[in-house]
Structures are given as C-alpha cells and as structure tokens.
C-alpha cells in the first residue's frame, strides 16, 4: 500500500503545503504518464504479493454476475447524490460562515481534454483505486481484526486525502462517493461494479463539462 500510494500521498502533501498546481500544460502528458506507470506498477506489485500468499484476484471479490451491471448503475446514482449532498453542505456552510463564494479549483485534466495520456489514466485508475485502495485495504484490515466500521472509515479517509490536489472542497465531497463504495464492498465483496462505476464517474465530467 505504501509503495503504491507514495506518489499520490506526496502530491496531496504538496497541495496542502504549497497550494494548487499551476495549470501550465507543458509536459502534462509526461506527468500523467508517470502516474499511469506508477498505478500499473502498483497493480503488478499486488499481483505479486497475492501470488506469494498463494492467492489470486478472486480472493478480493466474488465472481462476475450479470446483476453487477445493475449494481453499477445504482452505485453511480448513489455516488453522485452523495457527492453533491456533501459538496453543497460544504459550499453553503462556507458561504454562511464567511459570506464569500467558495471557488472551485481548476481541473487541469478537463482543460487538457481527451488526450491519450488522460484516456490511459481513466482506464487504469479505477482498477488501482478500487482494487488496491478499497478491496485489498479493507480485506487486509479485516484480517487484522479491524472492525467493519473502522475499515470503512480508513478506506474513505485515504482517497479523500489523496484527492486534495483537486481542491479541499472537491476532496471532501468525494468522500461521499467513497463512503458509498466502501459500504457496498463491505456488505457484498463485489468488486466489478465498483470498478465499472468508478470508470463511468471518471469519464462523465468530460462529456458534461460544458453543461
């Protein structure tokens, strides 16, 4: 976990200490390419670790079922509702406390559009975050006798912190999505719907960014 998430953790710390990254798109594809390679290496490392333990991918999930497609749709809807509920609580809470409008950090990924590097990241990232950051993390915590509720809290806190580079408001709102996903996994141990839902949620902003 530490090796796989080290780069993202350093990115989050950089954001908290120094503020948002510049929206300069020079060398953007190279930076995203490094992220993709890091996530692929993390997944390969997990495969190696599971193999050393005499386990495989099925250790983390039940078999794929057609009903997983319906679960995916429900997860996408639930994740969006949770995201916007928390976002507007943060947004209006900030306004009532400061009488100022909460400004969103610019999304450099949306500015870049459908570059090859972006598509590669969108295709790899759902597997990286859901397989390692949710399924494997929760499974390992449960094996260490950590209660389900605490395992969910930890699996929500980790990606929330790691998404600080998108803006604190966005990261906090994203915790709603993570909460829905983590509770679902603890209750069902079905990983395929999580990966598919995450994939849809990552692609969606590029299609609706103009609305």
Image: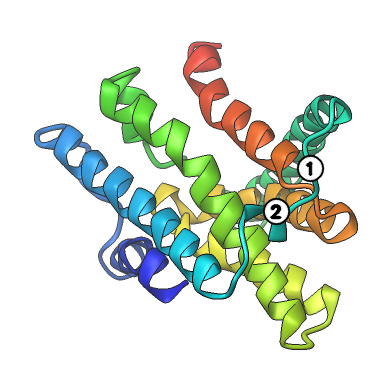
Where residue 164 sits: x, y (%)? 45, 57
Residue of label 1: 63
- Tell me if mark 2 has few (under 14), some (14-19) or many (20+) residues whose alpha carbon lies within 10 angstroms of its own: few
On the picture, is 208 further left or further right than 120?
Answer: right
Outermost residue on the bottom side: it is 145
Q: Which sits in the foreground, 50 or 163?
A: 50
Q: CA distance from mark 2 to mark 1?
A: 7 Å
SS assignment at label 2: helix
Q: Dividing the image into 4 quarters, which one contains the C terminus?
A: top right
- Give the residue displayed 60% in from the left and 51% down from the top: 130
Q: Is residue 18 above or below residue 173?
A: below
**Residue found at x 64% / y 46%:** 91
Q: Is residue 100 visible in the rendered structure shown here?
A: no
- N-term mark: 2 or 1: 2
Q: Are marks 2 and 1 in contact (CB under 8 Å)?
A: yes
Q: How many discs mark residues in the rendered view? A: 2
Residue assigned mark 2: 58
* Depicted 129 relative to depicted 7: above or below: above
Q: Quadrant of residue 23?
A: top left
Q: From the viewer's perspective, is residue 154 above or below residue 39?
A: below
Q: Residue at x 62, y 49 (%)?
A: 174
- What color scheme is it? rainbow
Q: Nearer the viewer, residue 167 or 41?
A: 41
State whether residue 127 appears in this view.
yes
Which structural element holds mark 1? Answer: loop
Q: Quadrant of residue 11?
A: bottom left
Q: How far from the left and from the top, in percent, is residue 126?
A: 54, 41
Give the label on residue 181, or none: none
Residue 66 in the figure: left or right of residue 105: right
Is 130 on the left-hand or right-hand side of 82?
Answer: left
Who is closer to the viewer here, 200 or 140?
140
Residue at the far front in the pictured view = 54
């Amino acid at each position: 976990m530490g090796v796989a998430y080290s780069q993202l953790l350093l990115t989050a710390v950089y954001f908290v200490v120094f503020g948002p990254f510049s929206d300069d798109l020079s060398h953007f594809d190279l930076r995203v390419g490094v992220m993709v390679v890091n996530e692929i290496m993390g997944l390969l490392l997990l495969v190696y670790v599971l193999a050393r333990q005499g386990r495989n991918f099925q250790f983390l999930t039940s078999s794929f079922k057609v009903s997983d497609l319906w679960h995916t749709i429900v997860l996408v809807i639930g994740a969006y509702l949770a995201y916007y509920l928390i976002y507007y609580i943060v947004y209006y809470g900030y306004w009532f406390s400061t009488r100022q409008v909460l400004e969103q950090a610019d999304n450099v990924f949306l500015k870049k559009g459908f570059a090859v590097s972006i598509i590669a990241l969108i295709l790899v990232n759902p597997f990286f975050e859901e397989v390692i950051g949710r399924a494997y993390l929760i499974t390992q915590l449960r094996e260490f006798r950590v209660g389900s509720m605490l395992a969910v809290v930890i699996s929500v806190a980790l990606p929330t912190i790691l998404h600080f580079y998108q803006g604190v408001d966005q990261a906090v709102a994203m915790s709603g999505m993570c909460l829905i996903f983590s509770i679902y996994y603890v209750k069902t141990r079905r990983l395929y719907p999580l990966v598919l839902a995450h994939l849809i949620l990552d692609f969606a902003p590029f299609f609706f960014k103009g609305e």
